[in-house]
Image (cartoon, rainbow, N blue to C red):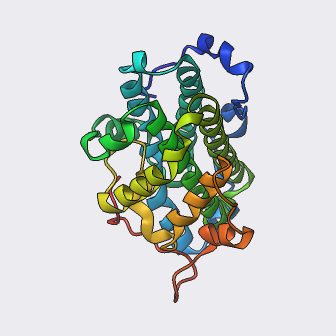
């Protein structure tokens, strides 16, 4: 994986005594680098499912890899961060880089795009911190943004699993399930650190979440910063998507009531009037 650093896992000892958790799964066993999708899955696919999934992967592959940039940026300010947060961040990056590689393999076996071309595309990315500086103010704002971003990814990947991953065979479907589970764990890990390390600032969470939502809606495109990458696909979700996510986050932190189950289900099953699937066009958003 060109441009991606290996992680020293020696700093994870303090994590084991906490409530921070990691979903363990073996990518090589599930989706070997030379994996070939059984032909009958491709033969039975509706054309719009194949086309939409290719376009979706052409963005998701690289936005997962952008986690390395965010990690490097936070590490450049490590003296401002708690040891518990930095240890959790190592586990988070290990997962996100596994997602990057899993999606590279998925993209390759579905489209035939070679890994060298993906390396070239990834190396040419320009990361713009200025548009999202507000959410990187300190450890507290980073953790709140992580909760917002990761729970958004849970429901985004649930939609992707429902619309796309499940059509390409067991291995690809299991990748989708692990993406959902990993992002859910990242959400809960950020919540645990907020509750244990920043409980005195919980009163600020609701206003900050509202500010993050406004910022995301105003971005118009994704700035290659990992956080707020859903700015490139807001049209795939109902207009009240962020409002429900905010309620869900506040409930997780003990600051409000949980949204109703049907309201959460709608987040990933909503389809615009007149469509069977939410359309994904190659020109929408920004990779």
- Is 262 located above or below residue 126 in the figure? below
Q: Can residue 107 be seen in this snapshot?
A: no
- Is 57 located above or below residue 199 in the figure? below
Report the side of 146 relative to 121 (left or right).
Answer: right
Report the side of 247 relative to 206 (left or right).
Answer: right
Position in image of residue 81 (x %, y %): 46, 21
Rendered residue at 36%/62% (across/down): 217
Rendered residue at 36%/35% (across/down): 137
- Is 160 located above or below residue 65 in the figure? below
Q: In which quadrant of the rendered view does residue 88 lie?
A: top right
Report the side of 230 relative to 134 (left or right).
Answer: right
User: In this view of the protein, which residue sits in the foreground, 16 or 249?
Assistant: 249
Q: In which quadrant of the rendered view does residue 186 lie?
A: top right
Rendered residue at 71%/56% (across/down): 169
User: In this view of the protein, which residue sits in the foreground, 151 or 137?
Assistant: 137
Q: Can residue 69 be seen in this snapshot?
A: yes
User: In this view of the protein, which residue sits in the foreground, 90 or 100?
Assistant: 90
Position in image of residue 72 (x %, y %): 39, 25
Position in image of residue 49 (x %, y %): 56, 70
């Amino acid at each position: 994986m060109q441009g991606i650093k290996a992680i020293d896992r020696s700093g994870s000892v303090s994590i084991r005594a906490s409530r921070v958790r990691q979903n363990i799964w073996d990518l090589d066993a599930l989706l070997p680098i030379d994996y070939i999708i059984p032909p009958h899955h491709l033969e039975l696919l509706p054309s719009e499912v194949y086309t939409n999934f290719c376009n979706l992967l052409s963005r998701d592959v690289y936005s997962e890899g952008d986690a390395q940039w965010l990690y490097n940026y936070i590490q450049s300010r490590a003296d401002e961060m708690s040891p518990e947060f930095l240890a959790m961040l190592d586990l988070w990056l290990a997962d996100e880089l596994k997602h990057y590689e899993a999606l590279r393999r998925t993209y390759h076996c579905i489209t035939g795009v070679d890994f060298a071309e993906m390396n070239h595309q990834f190396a040419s990315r320009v990361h713009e911190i200025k548009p999202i500086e507000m959410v990187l103010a300190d450890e507290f704002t980073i953790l709140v943004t992580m909760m917002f971003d990761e729970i958004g990814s849970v429901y985004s990947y649930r939609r992707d699993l429902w619309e796309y991953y499940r059509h390409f065979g067991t291995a690809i479907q299991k990748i989708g399930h692990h993406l959902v589970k990993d992002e859910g764990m990242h959400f809960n890990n950020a919540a645990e650190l907020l509750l244990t390390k920043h409980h005195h600032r919980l009163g600020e969470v609701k206003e900050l979440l509202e500010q993050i939502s406004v910022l995301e809606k105003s971005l118009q495109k994704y700035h290659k910063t990992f956080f707020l990458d859903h700015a490139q696909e807001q049209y795939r979700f109902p207009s009240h998507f962020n409002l429900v996510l905010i309620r869900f986050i506040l409930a997780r932190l003990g600051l409000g009531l949980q949204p109703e189950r049907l309201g959460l289900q709608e987040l990933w099953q909503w389809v615009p009037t007149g469509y069977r699937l939410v359309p994904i066009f190659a020109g929408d958003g920004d990779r």
